[in-house]
Amino acid sequence: MPSDEEDYIPWIQQFCELFGHDYFVQVSQDFIEDDFNLTGLSSQVPYYREALYTILDYQVETAEDSPQDNNSIPGTANTTATTNTANTSSSKKEAKNELPNKALLAHSAELLYGLIHARYIISKQGLTAMASKFERNDFGSCPRYFCDGMHLIPVGSTDIPGQETVRLYCPCCNDIYIPSSSRYLNIDGAFFGTTFPGLLVKMFPEIENQCRIRINKFSANDFGLKLFGFKVNETSASGPRMRWLRMHPKTDEEKEEYENCEFSVPKWVSDSDMEDANDDDQEDGDDLDDDEDDEDDDDEEENDDDDKTMASE
């Protein structure tokens, strides 16, 4: 008969095999045992030490496991024995109150593992494991027609747990989608974080190549609503929405315009250019002062003429 050690399944493997946990990868134990990788998590997870021991398959005592208080006292016990028994029982109650129950410990362990998972998938080992799942299309495909079944990447809108559930990012159309199955709607988005999709795309250039192939494939035949053969104007109420998000510069003129757009990074300005700009501003100011002086002189001459006319009358 097989022994209990052979039948035992590690906690991490059990967690990743649960219903709806297909997006997770198994974090290596060496990564979890490195305290540097867990910096700052003790303040976010209740019963942090007990939850960490649970993930690492250590024995953790819970409130249900503590022995029950024995209130029965023999009739022959003296007053001193009764007092010691009361003190012992009170200390046991305090220690029992400090221990987490099984439900709270399970929740803390899942929260801690999710936050560790968000840090693990941006490491080299984690990126490799998630890239394998991305290649197998474990996260699903983009529902947009022009993306041609581009594989999706899990992403979180924030790194703070408890804010929003996981979303799926498409690197082709740069849109975010809700998972099609309700089994994934209980997964916290912070367990994947906001950094992972961009880092995965940059670490594996073939993802960008796949996106470029799809963009060039459908760019020649862009679909648009038509009325009797005429395309609907983009500014109309029924025109296309947010097309600029999916437009990519192709010609040299479009690339130059894109580089010189108002959202581009400001170019470096030399000191000589700044001095020339200041000199131009000073010259413009001097010209304005001269024009004001000329206007004042003209006003004084008009007043003198009026005075002479009144005197002659």
Image (cartoon, grey):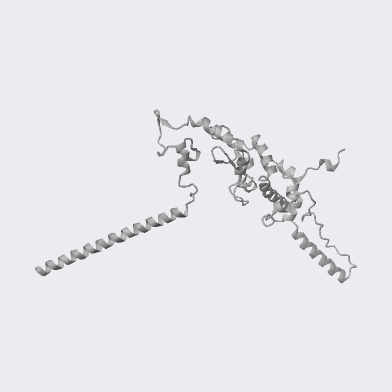
Q: Nearer the viewer, residue 261 or 7?
A: 261
On screen, residue 216 versus residue 207, left or right, reads left
At 11% from the left and 70% from the top, the residue drawn is: 311
At 68% from the left and 40% from the top, the residue drawn is: 128
Outermost residue, bottom direction? Answer: 79
On screen, residue 207 versus residue 219, left or right, reads right
Q: Nearer the viewer, residue 298 or 179?
A: 298
The image quadrant that residue 85 belongs to is bottom right
In the rendered view of the protein, which quadrant contains the N terminus? top right
Q: Position of residue 230 (x, y in %)?
A: 39, 30
On screen, residue 264 versus residue 46, left or right, reads left
Let me know if residue 20 appears in the view.
no
Q: Position of residue 250 (x, y in %)?
A: 48, 35
Image vertical order of residue 170 relative to residue 76, above or below = above
Q: Position of residue 148 (x, y in %)?
A: 56, 32
Q: Position of residue 51 (x, y in %)?
A: 73, 52
